[in-house]
Image (cartoon, helix red, strand yellow):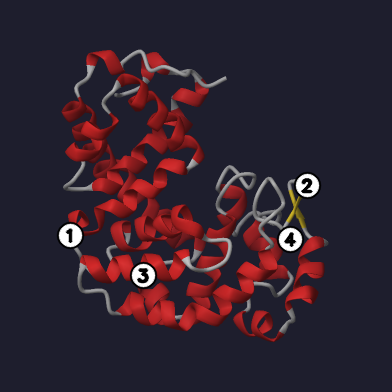
Amino acid sequence: MTPKYCIKLKKKSAKEIASFLIKKFNENKVNHLVEEFKKFGFSSRSLINDLENLFKFLVLLSYDRRPFSPYEIVWDRENPNSVFSILEENGLLNLSNILKTPEDELHKYLDKLRVKGLRLSYLDLGKRIKASKTLKEIASRVDKIMAQLRNLTSGYDVFVLHKMLDDIYGIGPTIASKFILYVVRCMGVGGINPSEYGDLALNLKDEWRISKWVKRLKDAGILEEVKRELRQDPFAFDYFWDLDRNFCSKRRCEECEL
């Protein structure tokens, strides 16, 4: 069971916490994410030049949530039982196939596929978000998304991109912000200063692992102050995900670097 309280929070100021997050995010996570996505077949170059590659990335990103966790069961192309492998094997990461297949037929096809016992026809635990509709909407809008991605010049452009993704059925603000985190912030597409699109990072507060830290910070009365201290690099907030996965959930509190 994950500890509800952090034994170190009382010893740290909001400024110290923010400085820690920014340091660890930039030293450890940014390059790790870039290299890992490269291993999965995605890079800044491929995502802005290869429509099929961007389509695959967006489809897999739509599954990157509970109950499809840990994230490796979605993205690991070397695992024959991952979402990536199962969808690819069945031609469901092929853009033209999705465009020409009726949504109801696509739903029936996805409903027969399983990863860790989970049906690929739904994206969430409540079985409300139909993957078939999400895939169809991604397929119909991926060209416009690529055009926006290739022409990022300001923070405003990043907000427009986020809105385009958020408007896709089944994506929503959290998944859209994860796209900005991975592609714009970490892969560096557009070369825009991280402080220009900071408010988008706040959507990550609803991500399962990060939400635990949001509650801890709220209870400690320093959430808003931590967010202010992160203004120069707000997506460093995502490093709370790493703390939860590597330390909190494993009850390694004393070993935690915070």
Nearer the camera: disc 2 or disc 4? 4
Type of the residue with mark 4: Ser
**Gap between marks 1 and 4, in whole Å?**
38 Å
Q: Could you say which quadrant of the image residue 148 lies in?
A: bottom left
In the figure, 252 relative to 172: above or below? Answer: above
Circle 4 is placed at which residue position? 121
Type of the residue with mark 3: Leu
The answer, for residue 115, to whether it is visible in the render is yes
Q: Could you say which quadrant of the image residue 80 lies in?
A: bottom right
Circle 1 is placed at which residue position? 193
* Residue 217, horizontal then vertical, whole percent: 33, 26
Query: Is 158 or 185 nearer to us in this picture?
Result: 158
In the figure, 34 relative to 46: above or below? Answer: above
Query: Is 151 or 71 nearer to us in this picture?
Result: 151
Nearer the camera: disc 2 or disc 3? 3
Which quadrant does the C terminus fall into?
top left
Q: Could you say which quadrant of the image residue 76 lies in?
A: bottom right
CB atoms of marks 1 and 2 within 8 Å: no
Circle 2 is placed at which residue position? 117
